[in-house]
């Protein structure tokens, strides 16, 4: 499944559409502690988190996430949104809890 | 990749979380362009970012020198911070001295140094209380 498909199938809201919407997703990955996410996140993950600060963007870039999904209605702060735009990172959001958001992605992948 | 050795130097500013990660992102982009394999680029980027964040949290910024040769990527991170009192303890996963405001940003899980060790082939820490810390990391190309 690609980043595009997540947007279409899971009904997440687009906060920023990055430069590679046709990028393949390996799996959903959930974690809010950035250092754990950084160390353990598989490459090309769809990363579900509630942390919407600028460091989330840096971790996503450096750990090669395919996209970020902000759960529980979390939003990017202004600096983070600007960084997402500058770096071409796709950031989506949903009101769903983290587990439910990740489950939706999983089900989309395994449908 | 050609056989030249390339050196990249960065200054990590103090107390600036909005800019932490710029050096690592820059190195990541350059390594990609040089044709370094993606798995190696990822290791370097993660290890270096953790080091960069440490410099912002614990020290007053510092400098990072990255040397790329055909055999390996060498990173030397130097700061003039407070130093690490007990390196063995600091290396333990989950041990952290980060303050609460850092934890609210999603850091301070005590995973920084363990991540750096995990993602590099060699890592050495030299630290003196009140003087500073130098972390040397190597990632082999093969």
Image (cartoon, coloured by chain):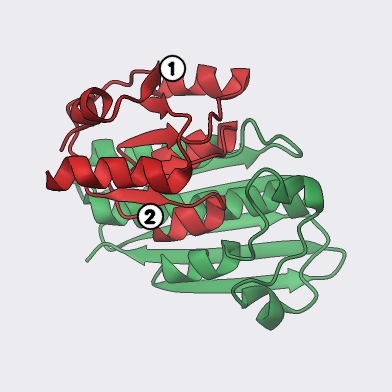
Indicate which disc, 1 or 2, sits on the residue closer to the N terminus: 2
Residue B28, picture quadrant: top left
Tell me: B99 left or right of A32: right
Secondary structure state at the residue bearing disc 2: loop
Q: The green chain is which one?
A: B
What residue is shown at x 67% (from left), y 82% (from top)?
A: B88
Q: Residues within 10 Å of mark 1 (few under 14, many from 20)?
A: some
- The quadrant of the picture occupied by the C terminus of chain B is bottom left
Instruction: Examine the rendered structure and indicate whether residue A14 appears above or below residue A104.
Output: above
**Front disc: 1 or 2:** 2
Tell me: B108 left or right of A100: right
Residue A94, picture quadrant: top left
Secondary structure state at the residue bearing disc 1: helix
Query: Which disc, if any, is residue A41?
Result: 2
What residue is shown at x 18% (from left), y 28% (from top)?
A: A5
Q: Residue furthest bottom?
A: B88
Most foreground residue, B104 or B23 = B104
Q: Position of residue A13 (x, y in %)?
A: 39, 20
Identify the hue of chain A: red
Most foreground residue, A46 or B139 = A46
Q: Mark 1 points at which residue?
A: A85
Q: Is residue B5 visible?
A: no
Most foreground residue, A105 or B102 = A105
Q: How crowded is mark 2: few (under 14 residues within 10 Å), some or many (20 or more)?
A: many
Instruction: Examine the rendered structure and indicate whether residue A3 appears above or below residue A17.
Output: below
């Amino acid at each position: 499944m690609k980043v595009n498909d997540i947007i279409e199938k899971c009904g997440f809201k687009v906060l920023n559409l990055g430069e590679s919407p046709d990028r393949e997703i390996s799996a959903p990955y959930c974690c809010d502690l950035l250092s754990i996410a950084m160390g353990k996140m598989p490459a090309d993950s769809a990363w579900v988190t509630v942390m919407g600060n600028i460091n989330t963007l840096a971790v996503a870039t450096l750990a090669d996430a395919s996209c970020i999904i902000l759960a529980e209605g979390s939003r990017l702060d202004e600096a983070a949104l600007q960084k997402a735009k500058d770096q071409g990172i796709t950031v989506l959001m949903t009101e769903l809890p983290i587990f439910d958001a990740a489950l939706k992605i999983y089900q989309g992948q395994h449908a | 990749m050609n056989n030249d050795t390339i050196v990249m130097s960065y200054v990590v500013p103090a107390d600036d979380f909005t800019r932490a990660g710029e050096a690592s992102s820059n190195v990541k982009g350059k390594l990609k362009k040089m044709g370094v394999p993606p798995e190696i680029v990822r290791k370097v980027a993660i290890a270096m970012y953790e080091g960069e964040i440490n410099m912002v949290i614990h020290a007053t910024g510092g400098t990072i020198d990255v040397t790329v040769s055909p055999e390996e990527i060498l990173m030397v991170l130097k700061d003039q911070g407070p130093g690490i009192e007990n390196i063995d303890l600091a290396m333990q996963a989950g041990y952290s001295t980060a303050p609460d405001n850092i934890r609210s940003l999603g850091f301070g899980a005590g995973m920084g140094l363990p991540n750096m060790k995990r993602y590099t082939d060699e890592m050495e820490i030299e630290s003196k209380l009140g003087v500073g810390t130098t972390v040397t990391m190597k990632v082999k190309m093969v």
